Structures are given as C-alpha cells and as structure tokens.
Image (cartoon, rainbow, N blue to C red):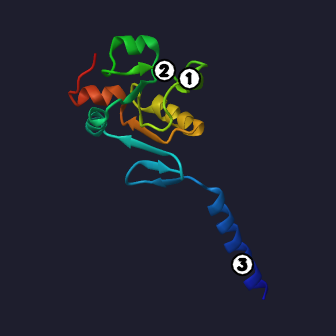
Amino acid sequence: MKIFALLFCILLSFQSCKEKNETTIGLETGTSKTEQTTIQVVSPNTFQKQISQSETPQIVDVRTLEEFEDAHLAGAVNISVTTGNFQEKAAALNKNAPVYLYCRSGGRSARAAQELEEMGFLEIYDLEGGITAWQAAGLPTQ
C-alpha cells in the first residue's frame, strides 16, 4: 500500500510540473511555443522569403546604432536590445503582426525575442546566425 501511495505522489508531482510548464520546445523545428506566442529561429533564406511575402514586415535590428549604420537589412528599424529602453521602443510595434529580429550572430536577437514574448508579441522570427549568416548567404544589405 505504501508503494502505491508513493507512486501516486510521484505521478501527481509530474502532472503538477507539466501544468506549470507552459512552454514546449520543438527541437527539430527550433520553435518555442506557448498558447499565445511563437518564436521561430529561421535560416536566412526562409527569413528573406517571409519578409518579402509580408505586406508590412516589422524588421528589427537589435544591434547597436553603430553596427546598424555599418550594414542592415532593407526596411529594418534599429532598436538596440543592449540599451535600457528596448521594451519602451519595442512597445511601438504591432504585437499582433509578425516581428522579424536579427543581430550580428543570433545571441542578442534571442534575448530580444524572449523580451518580446514576455511583452505579449504573438509571432516572432529570429534570424539564425544573424546578419553574418545573411551576408554569407549572399543576401543584400544596405
């Protein structure tokens, strides 16, 4: 009887942990989902295809202003994630429309994606490998 009670408690604790964990990660797709938000890490070619098919893409370069001025994607706005006002500036974006993020190699844009997710953005695309991978794929910058 004690073993049955112990097994019941273990199963109950696993169920409790499962309910608390709202985020699931699809390892094959590179996708992190909650009921409301989707963050997808996509290749440069997929990123380019998605922004070209969008009527009004929200492309956000999260690097510093100096990096942005050196080279950036056409149509991108600069909202540096390393400044203290990232969330304030990002609040001007449409939370219900896709947001396309990139940085130099992917680290800062991953951080920005998490911040946007916490702010309630619904669809977030993060450029895998950043602008470095974009340029290596032969895609244009300004």
Taking depth in this image into account, of 53 and 61 the one nearest to the observer is 53
Q: Earlier in the sequence, mark 1 or mark 2?
A: 2
At a point 39% along the width and 15% down the height, the residue shown is: 68
Residue located beneath label 3 in the image: 8
Residue located beneath label 2 in the image: 79
Q: How many marks?
A: 3
Q: CA distance from mark 1 to mark 2?
A: 6 Å
Give the residue type that dot 1 points to.
Phe
Relative height, residue 12 to residue 60 (above, below):
below
Give the residue type that dot 2 points to.
Ile
Residue located beneath label 1 in the image: 86
The residue positioned farthest toward the left in the image shown = 138
Give the residue type that dot 3 points to.
Phe
Q: CA distance from mark 3 to mark 2?
A: 50 Å
Q: Where is residue 29 shown, x and y percent of the image?
A: 38, 51
Q: Where is residue 3 shown, x and y percent of the image?
A: 74, 84
